[in-house]
Image (cartoon, rainbow, N blue to C red):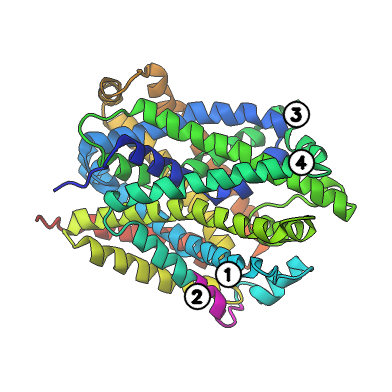
Amino acid sequence: MRDIWQSRTSFVLASIGSAIGLGNIWRFPYICYANGGGAFLIPYLVALFTAGIPLMILEFSLGHYFEAPAPMALGKVRKPFEILGWFALLVGFGICTYYAVVMGWCFDYLGLAVKKAWGEHTQEFFFNEFLKISQGPLMLGSIRGWIVLGLVLSWIWIIACIWKGPTTVGKVVYFTVTIPWIILIIFVIRGITLPGAIEGLKFYLTPNFSKLLDYKVWLNAYSQVFFSLTIGFGVQITYASFLPKKADIVNNAFLVSLADAATAFIGGFAVFSTLGYYALKSGLPVDKVVASGPQLAFVTYPTIINLLPIGSVIFGILFFIMLLTLGIDSAFSLVEAGAAGIKEKFNLNRTKVNIGFGVIALVIGLIYTTNGGLYWLDIVDYFMNNFGLMIVALLQCVLVGYFYSLKELRHYANNQSDFSIGIWWDFCIKILTPVVVLFLVLSNIIDRIKTAYGNYPRIAEFLGGWLLVIIFIITAIILYKQKHRSA
């Protein structure tokens, strides 16, 4: 019997939850600030409507029309295209191995927040005491026990959320999507009432229209859209395959995409208002305290929490609960997509697949719990997103756009939906998006030829980047060649 969502709301919330993740809080505000402030919203919205939403419609249409996870859905377009579906799921698997570790850090810091045990020197605590970071990626050192504990808790939570597939996910997302939004609103209200908040928001939103003449700003906008929406991982294809026969496609794609964009934009108010307060208290200009990624979450924000005049412990606890609930939906969506593909291909028991997936990912993730783990996390994250994700997005557009009838798929989506899309969608899928993504991939390749990513040793870049991509391609081919086992 085919898995199915219990309601449209469950599907929409699950898709929104998959799209909304840690990047909405710690990546978008920084990218916006660094690429023209308020002016960046122009290329971002252009990218959203010419690439993000069209690709979301494409993935929803493929999953719903073929009623199958990513490998099988793409395989029904042309049999060899199943390889691309497996590659997409493997990229998602690669991300899961370190994403769960970052969630583990959040679990650890949630415990630390009770007594603000990170102390006054948050940067020194995070890097030298919590991570005990080594001199480089080739110096792994030892495994950090507390990080492993957080990692185990993350995987227990992830597997519990997808225990019965869409049935469990559909119930969980009512909490894991709404809770971070409620907390985010609390942080926005608290942030904008702090002294110095206005200065922080000026840095976030002051338009620098001259930046729009820089092509890299436009490329960054498209990159952010791809990273943020969880397209190219096979997740949205799989989620759409769980929809009932009569289900909206176009409207849902717009809802999910716009909700993700709104969360990222509003997240910037929470981040930059508090950064303005931090700048005021520390006597530094705002641009000197701006950070993104782990630095923002585990160094800058704990410092801000220390400085809050009242309720600092409560806000510390709320902050890491928000990060955990933001991260969990993205994490289990990647696992659910991969598990659904394996289950469908080999006719295996869902419970065994889920547990097996989690155990393998946890064991691989142990490398990120070592003293050199942060370096490997950085390298793998860069290659999974800038090459793995981009390759899937590019080939998905080309293979479906030129080897299948986009017109037929568009008519199918329109017949299912409250409002229709026109031939602009065909243009975006066949021409605009592939050209932009190809440019992004070639730009990254040229950059990597010139210098190793992050100035890491070339051997580390190869092992954590190029070799991993090659292994995933070979594994995808092997999985494709395995015989489908019927029930």
Residue type at mark 1 is: Asp
What secondary structure is found at the residue carrying circle 3? loop
Instruction: Report the mark closest to the observer, 3 or 4.
Output: 4
Given this view, does label 3 or label 1 mark the residue nearer the observer?
1
Residue on which the image places disc 3: 207
Q: Earlier in the sequence, mark 3 or mark 1?
A: 1
Q: Residues within 10 Å of mark 3 (few under 14, many from 20)?
A: some
Residue range in magenta is 139-150
Which residue, given by chain and number where applicable, does mark 1 sit on? 108
Q: Nearer the viewer, mark 2 or mark 3?
A: 2
Amino acid carrying mark 2 in the image: Leu
Compared to residue 18, the image places residue 350 above or below, namely below
- Asked if the residue under mark 1 is in contact with the one under mark 3, i.e. CB atoms within 8 Å, the reply is no
As rendered, which of 292 and 476 lies closer to the eye?
A: 292
Q: Nearer the viewer, mark 2 or mark 4?
A: 4
Considering the numbered disc 2 on the image, is that residue within a helix, a strand or a loop? helix
- Disc 4 or 1, which lies upstream in sequence? 1
Give the residue at mark 2: 149
User: How far separated are the C-alphas under marks 4 and 1?
Assistant: 29 Å
> Neighbour class for label 2 at 10 Å: few (<14), some, many (≥20)?
some
Quadrant hosting residue 273: top right
Return the disc, 2 or 4, that comes first in the chain's sequence.
Answer: 2
Q: Is residue 130 magenta?
A: no
Residue at position x 51%, y 51% in the image = 326
Residue 455: percent from the left, percent from the top? 67, 62
Q: Position of residue 185 (x, y in %)?
A: 61, 41
User: How far apart in space, not on screen, are marks 3 and 4 (Cα)?
Assistant: 23 Å
Q: Is residue 34 above or below residue 300?
A: above
Using the numbered discs, state the Cα–Cα distance from disc 3 to disc 1 in whole angstroms.
38 Å
Q: Amino acid at mark 4?
A: Thr
